[in-house]
Image (cartoon, rainbow, N blue to C red):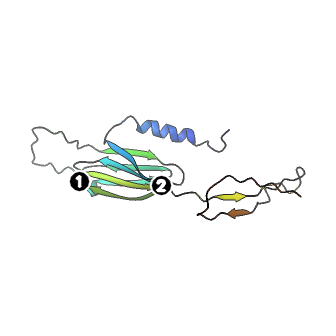
Amino acid sequence: MFLGFDHLEQMLERASKNASDGYPPYNIEQVSPTTLRITLAVAGFVMEDLHITQEDNQLVIRGRQSDDGQGRIFLHRGIAARQFQKAFVLAEGIEVGGAWMDNGLLHIELARPQPEVRVRKIEIGHGPTASSSRDRVAPVVDVPAGRKQRVVRVIDEE
């Protein structure tokens, strides 16, 4: 049973809205165990035409080209010159590291920091009392990052 995932339906709804438009094409690659990279093909756009924002857990990339084709006559226009908005739903804890352009490709670096292992002792009482467990906070024990992660169950014999 999953608890506290009420917002999951909203995230799936957002993702399905954005899945229908294939422009601009993009790649998502895993660069390292903790790093992802989104690469969008944005031929014809310059950095001033692109805007990247993070709105809650959603990464939004917008592109709008300025009309500099005044006086130019195209016999064939195969490079799309339309505006776009591409959104990616980010998991909790994902951080945007930076963005850069290279040869018509927009790269966005994402980092997934390793969560700290926390062990918390939960005391077992004799039943509901006037001071419920909501009023007491169990101590948090920090485990050094160098130690191997494992599940620990603490049972206190009193």
Q: Give the residue at mark 1.
A: 103
At horizontal 20% and vertical 42% (from top left) the residue drawn is 79
* 57 left or right of 63 in image: right
Mark 1 residue element: loop
Badge 2 amino acid: Thr
At horizontal 70% and vertical 58% (from top left) the residue drawn is 119
Q: Give the residue at mark 2.
A: 34
Give 117 or 54, whichever is nearer the viewer: 117
Give 20 or 144, whichever is nearer the viewer: 144
At horizontal 32% and vertical 58% (from top left) the residue drawn is 100
* 118 left or right of 99 in image: right
Residue 86 point in image, percent of width and height: 37, 45
Residue 74 point in image, percent of width and height: 11, 41
Mark 2 residue element: loop
Q: Which mark is residue 157?
A: none
| Foreground disc of the pair 2, 1 | 2
